[in-house]
Image: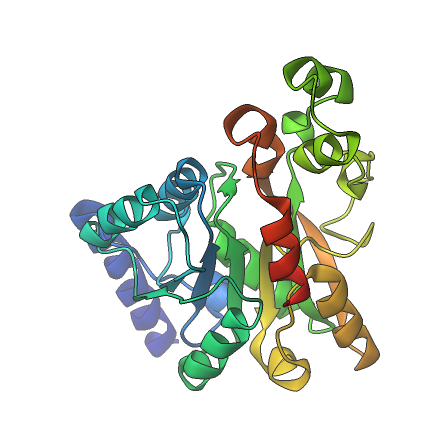
């Protein structure tokens, strides 16, 4: 009893110190000890979205993490300026400027860091913003995975308010092809449909690859292929389950491409996704 009380006092003291010194407080949810948690952020061009994403992560993560930025050979010179600004904040554990925009980059870096990784790691794209919540979203997702050992992969819910209608998009880009317009606004995304959110973890469709908490041992087993459909199939074939939590919500800035990046190169994106 005395040892438990002493441990509680030490944890509380760390929290108070972190609050006044503005340092991250590592308070594992429910006492979970899951080792070092890495966040891999994948970036390619679109510096507006990169800045917004990094700022969101910088402000919303309230636990100790190691953030590794993977820039997949961005050609926009502003990307390096954005990254440098967050390097000055001391945000990153490491930054990798890759030579090519290739789907194997994330597997290569997973292999490089997996010996240092704890029970879980996060994989995210540099075009999302985490919606504010009173709790640390990282700890929320870890806590769910700890209570649901059947899960190997956990995604989060999308804020659907950023979806743009086809009519609005056509007014903005009257000369664009239908295919390009549908890609810009993700017209065929299953996330446009209403889903029931009366449970902590739901299974309406495969969790989107833009924000995933993964069990390290499962990824060691199946690898880390690009694309949520490929990854989820590989996991399912080995008997692993996945889901989406309703307790963490993100905005997907790519839904706003029609406004900010109407000439976004989907050919390059498809090459990346198919590892050509």
Residue 28 visible to an observer of this rendering: yes
Q: Position of residue 42 (x, y in %)?
A: 48, 57
Residue 34 visible to an observer of this rendering: no
- Which residue sits at x=45%, y=75%? 109
- Left or right placement of residue 124 versus residue 241 in this view: left
Within the image, what quadrant is residue 103 found in?
bottom right
Q: Nearer the viewer, residue 209 or 7?
A: 209
- Which residue sits at x=60%, y=60%? 272
Within the image, what quadrant is residue 149 found in?
bottom right
Q: Is 37 located above or below residue 25 in the figure?
A: below
Quarter holding the N terminus is bottom left
Q: Position of residue 171 (x, y in %)?
A: 69, 13
Q: Nearer the viewer, residue 214 or 8?
A: 214
Q: Position of residue 49 (x, y in %)?
A: 45, 38
Q: Nearer the viewer, residue 271 or 79?
A: 271
Q: Is 96 located above or below residue 23 in the figure?
A: below
- Left or right placement of residue 125 versus residue 68 in this view: right
- Which residue sits at x=33%, y=76%? 2
Q: Position of residue 185 (x, y in %)?
A: 69, 32
Q: Nearer the viewer, residue 178 or 185?
A: 178
Within the image, what quadrant is residue 237 found in?
bottom right
Q: Residue furthest top?
A: 171
Quarter holding the C terminus is bottom right
């Amino acid at each position: 009893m005395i040892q438990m009380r002493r441990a509680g006092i030490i944890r509380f003291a760390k929290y108070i110190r972190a609050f006044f010194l503005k340092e991250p407080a590592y308070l594992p949810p429910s006492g979970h000890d899951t080792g070092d948690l890495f966040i891999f952020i994948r970036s390619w061009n679109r510096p507006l979205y990169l800045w917004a994403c990094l700022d969101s992560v910088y402000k919303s993560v309230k636990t100790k993490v190691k953030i590794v930025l993977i820039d997949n050979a961005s050609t926009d010179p502003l990307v390096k300026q954005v990254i440098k600004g967050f390097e000055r904040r001391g945000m990153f554990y490491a930054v990798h400027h890759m030579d090519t925009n290739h789907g194997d980059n994330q597997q290569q870096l997973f292999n490089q860091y997996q010996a240092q990784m704890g029970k879980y790691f996060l994989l995210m794209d540099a075009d999302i913003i985490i919606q504010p919540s009173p709790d640390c979203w990282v700890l929320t997702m870890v806590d769910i995975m700890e209570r649901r050992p059947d899960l190997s992969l956990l995604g989060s819910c999308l804020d659907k308010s950023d979806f743009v209608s086809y009519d609005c998009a056509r007014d903005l880009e009257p000369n664009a092809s239908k295919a390009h317009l549908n890609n810009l606004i993700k017209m065929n995304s299953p996330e446009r449909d209403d889903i029931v959110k009366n449970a902590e973890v739901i299974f309406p469709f495969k969790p989107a690859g833009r924000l995933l908490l993964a069990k390290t041992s499962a990824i060691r087993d199946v690898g880390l292929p690009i694309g949520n459909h490929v990854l989820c199939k590989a996991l399912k074939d080995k008997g692993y389950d996945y889901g989406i939590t309703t307790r963490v919500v993100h905005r997907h800035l790519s839904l706003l491409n029609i406004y900010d990046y109407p000439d976004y190169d989907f050919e390059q994106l498809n090459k990346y996704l198919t590892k050509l």
